[in-house]
Image (cartoon, grey):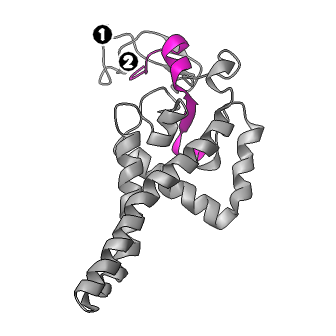
Amino acid sequence: MSYSGSGNSGGADAGGPSSAGGAWRNDGGVPPHAFDPDMQPELFRGVLTRRVFAFLIDLVVLSVPVVLGYIFIFVFGIVTLGLGWMLFWLAWPATIVWAIVYYGASIGGPHSATLGMRAMDLELRTWYGAPGYFVLGACHAVLYWISVSFLTPLVLLIGLFNGRRRLLHDMILGTVVINSSVRTQVAPSPRSSY
């Protein structure tokens, strides 16, 4: 059990509680999850299927600039009599940087979702209900690719065995993907402190 403090008198120096609040808590000081699949099942209904389609849409969005970049380098190489083709070694690292920036900026944006997720009415939230941010979006993409690469795509089946339909990288990062339009109707506002 932990005491969250009374805020009356005696801080940490007097041996009393040091934080304000005045309530005994038996939860170890950890706030509950913002999205409960038992109380709000509509937040998670159809999420896995729509995540697949959102991923495919995002793959197309990511591929268009990459293909255009390769075409530009090829044509530039012809114009410069082969010298421009030395830029091909930059294409692969640029592709990785582009994907990380795309996921980070879109998940860290105001909709907390990539273009594919927005098209499929999904959004990414932290387990306590806050919207995504750039580093979280970038890490989400990197952990997804690492988990699928090392553990095979069969690791995605983990989403079938939990109520929040979270994948391995969601669990590691403490995120959840929910139905966006349903959240605006029934979910509580993001909790910032307790």
> Does 6 sit left or right of 46 as displayed?
left
* SS at badge 2: loop
User: Looking at the picture, how far across and down is residue 154, in whole percent?
Assistant: 74, 56
Label 1 Cα crowd, 10 Å radius (few <14 / some 14-19 / many 20+): few
Say whether disc 2 or disc 1 marks the residue closer to the N-terminus. 1
Boundaries of the magenta span: 170-194
> Does 71 sit left or right of 154 as displayed?
left
* Residue furthest right as drawn: 161
Screen quadrant of the C terminus: top left
Q: State the separation of the CA atoms marked 2 and 1.
A: 8 Å
User: Looking at the picture, how far across and down is residue 119, in whole percent?
Assistant: 50, 35
- Dot 2 and dot 1 residues touching (CB under 8 Å): yes
**88 or 112, which is in the foreground?**
88
**67 or 38, which is in the foreground?**
67
Q: Amino acid at mark 1?
A: Ser
Residue 133 lies, with reference to residue 11, above or below; the image says below
* SS at badge 1: loop
